[in-house]
């Protein structure tokens, strides 16, 4: 079937979407497409945890409804079906910053990071407009059973044995947003680029380029005439999950953090000096609380790894991570240009929000504010955006879309 002529393609896609609307029972869909522009007749969002609606180290139907992808679909006036996850979620988000207790319901009983409640009945549909899967890396969207996702229940729950690209093509998309690449570097950077077996390794730029090109080429080949926006990778060092080493020179901050760690932290002041520029990955606190690591904070490399290596990203390593992400983003921008897509750099949004929130600006969590220790724009895991930040992301994407395609989408609210 040829879909190279946009008008013919639009008519065929409309027929398919109307057929889907007839059997959909997802009440959150705009079930009869009334797009603001024909290019938005069928929207699909590919990505990982941020796109899916992950917040506070978990995801459920409530957080999914706050995704920038849903806000975009509303602005476009187009159908939006997502794989709603039954409360309290898969896995349930953190509900208490100090105890790290997770969301529960009256019927769920206590939950943990391993708890998984499956799809809501109302969200069951074969055609999803949000096919994002938390945890995926650049190699995963083109694979039906990615080896790296073997232990991730969401890969099967959301994609059902198809690759992400295949699932995206199920809705005959006319417009797509793609936000893939954060997980290729996030965990290694937070872990301080520690060597195996202490931490995973970041994806080299050459490998990333091959993976990303395969994904986009398959997507575009399967949907001739597709428009869209490719989204860059976040600079990990700018996320509040990375705490400045200078914060650990403050006794009040260390005392509050000790409560979260469940034991008194000791700071190695021979490495945490006034001139030290290292960043400390916040997950070290969870590792100390679990007694996997000793309750010692070192701010520089030491002769006895993992102390001083794991979760410590020194100044030289910060430059390495930045260069790696710059390489990713340089390619994503070039790929967007080559296929006629828009490009959105999320770091511009993060930089703007840092002027409005001291936690983002200083990399020092506000431990007196247990409801929002990482500020108003970042949830309780120090990584994933809050609903307020998703609105900012959606509006910056709308600006890119309107500029690239001459559309007139209104801001999200």
Image (cartoon, grey):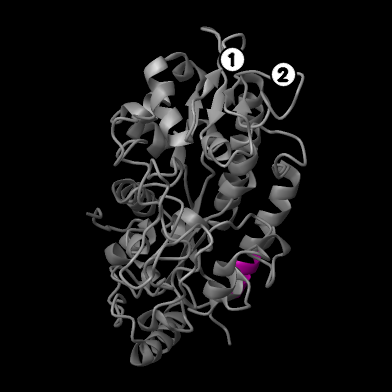
Q: Report if the CB atoms under discs 1 and 2 are less than 8 Å apart.
A: yes
Q: Earlier in the sequence, mark 1 or mark 2?
A: 1
Q: Which mark is residue 132?
A: none
Residue 81 at x, y = what percent?
39, 75
Q: For residue 163, which quarter of the picture?
A: bottom right
Does residue 59 sit above or below 395 in this rendering?
below
Q: Residue at x 24, y 56 (%)?
A: 410
Residue 174 at x, y = what percent?
45, 71
User: Would residue 232 be found to the left or right of residue 33 on screen?
Assistant: right
- Number of the front mark, 1 or 2: 1
Q: Which image quadrant: the N terminus? A: bottom right
Magenta residues, start to end: 217-222
The answer to whether any part of residue 93 appears in the image is yes
Does 45 lie within the magenta span? no
Q: Residue at x 41, y 62 (%)?
A: 110
Does residue 271 sit above or below 195 in this rendering?
above
Instruction: State the residue position of label 1.
Output: 268
Instruction: State the residue position of label 2.
Output: 302
Label 2 element class:
loop
Does residue 311 sit above or below 24 in this rendering?
above
């Amino acid at each position: 079937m040829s879909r190279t002529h946009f008008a013919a393609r639009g008519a065929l896609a409309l027929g398919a979407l109307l057929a889907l609307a007839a059997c959909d029972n997802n009440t959150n869909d705009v079930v009869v497409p009334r797009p603001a522009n024909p290019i938005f007749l069928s929207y699909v969002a590919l990505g990982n945890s941020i796109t899916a609606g992950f917040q506070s180290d978990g995801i459920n139907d409530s957080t999914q409804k706050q995704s920038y992808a849903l806000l975009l679909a509303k602005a476009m006036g187009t159908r939006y079906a997502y794989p709603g996850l039954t409360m309290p979620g898969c896995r349930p988000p953190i509900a208490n910053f100090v105890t790290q207790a997770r969301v529960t319901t009256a019927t769920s009983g206590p939950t943990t990071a391993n708890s998984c409640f499956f799809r809501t009945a109302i969200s069951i549909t074969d055609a999803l407009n949000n096919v994002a899967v938390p945890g995926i890396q650049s190699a995963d969207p083109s694979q039906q059973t990615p080896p790296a996702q073997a232990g991730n229940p969401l890969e099967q729950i959301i994609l059902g044995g198809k690759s992400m690209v295949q699932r995206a093509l199920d809705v005959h998309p006319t417009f797509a947003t793609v936000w893939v690449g954060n997980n290729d570097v996030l965990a290694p950077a937070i872990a301080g680029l520690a060597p195996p077996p202490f931490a995973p390794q970041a994806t080299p730029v050459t490998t990333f380029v091959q993976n990303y090109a395969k994904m986009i080429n398959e997507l575009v080949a399967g949907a001739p005439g597709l428009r869209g926006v490719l989204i860059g990778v976040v600079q990990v060092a700018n996320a509040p999950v990375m705490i400045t080493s200078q914060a650990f020179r403050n006794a009040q901050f260390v005392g509050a953090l000790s409560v979260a760690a469940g034991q008194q932290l000791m700071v190695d002041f021979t490495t945490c000096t006034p001139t030290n520029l290292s960043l400390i990955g916040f997950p070290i606190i969870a590792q100390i609380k679990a007694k996997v690591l000793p309750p010692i904070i070192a701010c520089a490399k030491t002769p006895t790894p993992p102390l001083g290596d794991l979760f410590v990203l020194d100044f030289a390593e910060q430059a390495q991570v930045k260069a790696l992400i710059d390489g990713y983003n340089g390619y994503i921008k070039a790929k967007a240009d080559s296929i006629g897509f828009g490009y959105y750099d999320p770091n511009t949004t993060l930089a703007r929000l840092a002027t409005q929130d001291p936690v983002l600006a200083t990399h020092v969590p506000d431990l007196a504010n247990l409801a929002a220790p990482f500020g108003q724009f970042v949830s309780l895991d120090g990584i994933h955006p809050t609903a307020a930040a998703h609105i900012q992301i959606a509006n910056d994407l709308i600006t890119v879309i309107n500029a690239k395609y001459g559309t007139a989408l209104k801001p999200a609210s």
